[in-house]
Amino acid sequence: MPQTQMNSLPSIEQKLLGVIAGQDLGDITQELCDFSLEEQNATAEAQGIQPTTASDFVPILGQTVTYIVACVLINDNDEVLAMQEAKKSCIGKWYLPAGRMEVGESICEAAIREVYEETGLNVEINTLLAVEAAGGSWFRFVLTGRITGGSLKTTGQADKESLQAKWVADITQLPLRAYDILSLIDIGKAYKHRNDTTTPQLWHSEILPTRYAHQKNYLRVVAVIRKRATNALNVLVSEKNVHHFPTVEVHPQRSLHSTLRKFMIELFGAELPQHRPHGILSIEHRKWYLPAGRMEVGESICDAAIREVYEETGLRVEISTILAVEAAGGSWFRFVLTGRITGGSLKTTAEADKESLQAKWVANITQLPLRATDILSLIDMGKAYMHRNDSTTPQLWHSEILPTRYAHQKNYLRVVAVIRKRATNALNVLPVLEEVSLIGKCTWHELSKTLKEKLGQILSSQHSTITLNVTK
């Protein structure tokens, strides 16, 4: 492209300063992508090469793309935090705290969780150290930080996550799961001691992934060249739609270097000038979701919902009912609620913080890059509840039900089991019918007419009770 005078593009310099500072640019990347997967496939076909990936490929965590986090934590004695593996394939071997990101997690949240699960220590992440890629669908984010609490896991606390953890002066003296961590430890130690020498090297600032949503994985390229005649430094600018840094969609079946090289050929032609990648300036990673989060100790379910809505959207809400309860195993529960807005103002990008980047009302949420699609059924449920009285044949819905504040020492299921007696058409609640055999302490009790009618209505309607979704 023709050289562009930078004094006519002050926004590009502002964007470059933002990238160097590890900030997101706020670009709608799919509109500014200069070499999409569809265009890469078209180029391959023109060369007689059959594309190996569909043009509409979407990276979905745990399905089509894998994100790994690994932490290099160094203490004041220059020891590295290591954990002993519990996995059958490498049991007894040592490694850095590391693991797969889970759906819905940010990179830092995954790192904090993995360190705690595998070592027993709490960590505050302060910077990325490296990003590793295998192909275009496996990425490992290497981070470091400082220990803020917890206690080292001992063999007496061994579980499926790890057998134990300890601080190690020379990790090469241990049987390692793999030696790929040695170079990461070197980076971590060099970063920790970056200011110790009389001639300290220039290191990047503390850079963490910014919470900004993208539908796909992209490489935004800051390509610079020095002009021989004037020694001036020039940065490459794309003019597609608006001035921006050249951007390419990551090909899931190619290495990042291969994707980058093909993109450079697309920009400069076959006579590609000599160049070399220098490193990563920033990472943007976040998606859209419903206001949601973990309950804190001492909160009621409604209090937690009110707090999360306000922290993530800026709006005040009055909760009116539970819509659903979801369970994964017997120790993870999600309570889905609805209500009405009573005040506040929608959070803007200028108010972005660790809770969220922004909030907005959306007519069709499927047009946004979603953190996970599990919310779509919940939204359908919420809309159905809101419009429950709109049709000429309204369905029976449960009344407005909120959790009652009553204390239990443990979690229980109280079961209301009903059965209809064939001979009399009577409804019975748990408890002695000739059609059903009971073993144990229960009997059948025949219901009164009022309750029979009430329960009959409930059993005939899909929405008359709060939905329960159970996953393995």
Image (cartoon, rainbow, N blue to C red):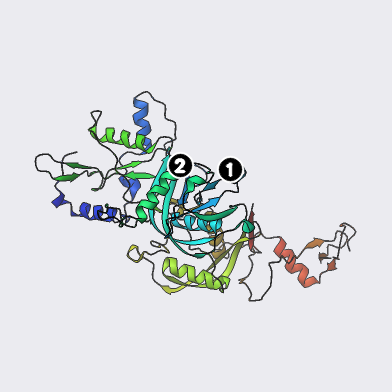
Query: In this rendering, would 240 be left or right of 288?
Result: left
Q: Earlier in the sequence, mark 1 or mark 2?
A: 1
Q: Secondary structure at mark 1?
A: helix
Query: In this rendering, would 396 be left or right of 192?
Result: right
Query: In this rendering, would 245 be left or right of 69?
Result: left
Residue 183 in view of the camera: yes
Disc 1 crowd, CA 10 A, few/some/many (<14, 14-19, 20+): some
Query: In this rendering, would 114 be left or right of 142?
Result: right
Count of labels in the image: 2
Across and down, in percent, residue 463 comes to 64, 61
Disc 2 crowd, CA 10 A, few/some/many (<14, 14-19, 20+): few
Taking the spot 35% from the left edge, 51% from the top edge, the residue there is 190
Taking the spot 63% from the left edge, 60% from the top edge, the residue there is 331
Q: Secondary structure at mark 2?
A: loop
Distance between the alpha carbons at the discs numbered 1 and 2:
15 Å
Quadrant for residue 259, please give it.
top left
Instruction: Give the answer, above or below, for where 414 lies relative to 132.
Output: below
Instruction: Give the answer, above or below, for where 178 lies relative to 468.
Output: above
The amino acid marked with disc number 1 is Cys
Q: Which residue is mark 2?
A: 180
Pick the residue in front: 167 or 48: 167
Pick the residue in front: 151 or 172: 172
Q: Which residue is mark 1?
A: 90
Pick the residue in front: 219 or 48: 219
